[in-house]
Amino acid sequence: MIDLHCHLDLYDNPKEVIKRSNELGIFVLSVTTTPSAFEITERLSSSCSRIRTAIGLHPQIAHERHTELEIFRSLVSKARYVGEVGLDGSKDFARFSSIQQIVFEDILAATQASGGKIISVHSRSAASQVVSTIKKFPSAGIPIFHWFSGNQAELREAIDIGAWFSVNPLMLMSKKGKELVRLMPINRVLTETDGPFTRNKSEPFYPWEASLAHPLLSQIWGVPEGEVIAQLLSNLKELTSASL
Ligand code: MN
C-alpha cells in the first residue's frame, strides 16, 4: 500500500500512526509544511525503512514562512524528497500569489542545484502557473501533482512536462476527479491520503486508508483490484529507482 502524500507530523498521535503504518509495511511519503519541521519529522520515523520524509514549505503559509527559505537551502541536500511545495490561487490565498511565486521559484532553484528531487506539488487553483514555473527549472526533478484539481487542459499541460500524480479516495469519489484520473497516464499514478487534512466522516484519513482508492481505480481503469495494486507498486518502483 502506498500513501505518497501524508502529513504524519500533524496527526494528534503521530507516533501511533507511524507505528501502525510501519507494522503494515505501507510506503509513506511524509511531507512537511515548513523547512524547520523537516529534521524533527524525519527523526519520528527514522527506524521505519518504508517511511520517507520530504522537506517542504506549503504555499498556504509561504507569506508567513518565507524566512525559512534559508533553512530549506541548507537542508535540501539531505533530502531525497521535496514537498509540500507549490502555489495556491484559491480565494483565501490568491492575495499572497507574489510571495508564493518567489518562494516556489527559490525552492525549485535550490532543488535543481542539489541535483533534482522527487517533488510533491500542491497546485490548487494554480495548475497552469505551477506548470509554467516548473518548466523554468527543468532539472529540479520529478514533480508529482498531489490531488490535482485543475481542468482537463491544465492536466494535459502537466502530463506534457512529465508530471506524475498522487490521487486520494476523496478525489476519486467526485465526478470531476474521476474524469481527471481517467486521463492520467496509468504508469504515472500513485495513491495518497493527504491526512490528516482530509476527513473520512469525523476521523482524519490514515495512511492505511489509501487502499480505499483501489476499488475506485479498478472501476476507472477497468481492471481487477489485484492489477491496480500491482500497477501502483510497479509505478512506485519506477519512481524510486529514478537517479535523483
Ligand atoms: Mn497536503
Image: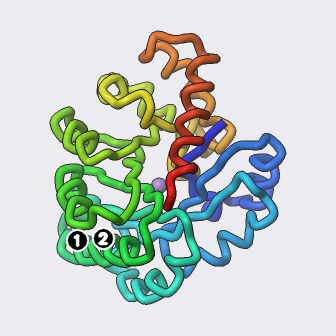
Q: Is residue 199 visible?
A: no
> What is the three-letter code of the residue carrying label 1?
Gln
Q: Is residue 20 left or right of residue 50?
A: right
| Element at label 2 | helix
Judge whether 143 appears above or below 139 on screen.
above
Report if the beta carbon of the residue with label 2 is closer than 8 angstroms to ligand 1. Answer: no
Circles 2 and 1, Cβ within 8 Å, touching? The answer is: yes
> Where's residue 38, x and y in %?
58, 74
Dividing the picture into quadrants, the one containing residue 232 is top right
> What is the three-letter code of the residue carrying label 2?
Phe
Q: Is residue 141 visible?
A: yes
Report if the beta carbon of the residue with label 1 is closer than 8 angstroms to ligand 1. Answer: no
Q: Residue at x 74, y 63 (%)?
A: 45
Q: Which residue is mark 1?
A: 101
Q: Nearer the viewer, residue 115 or 201?
A: 115
> Where's residue 20, x and y in %?
80, 47
Q: Residue at x 20, y 33 (%)?
A: 152
Judge whether 11 appears above or below 235 on screen.
below
- The Cα–Cα distance between marks 2 and 1, rounded to whole angstroms, is 5 Å
Q: Is residue 66 left or right of residue 54?
A: left
Q: Quadrant of the N terminus?
A: top right
Q: How many marks?
A: 2
> Where's residue 107, x and y in %?
36, 74
Q: Which residue is mark 2?
A: 104
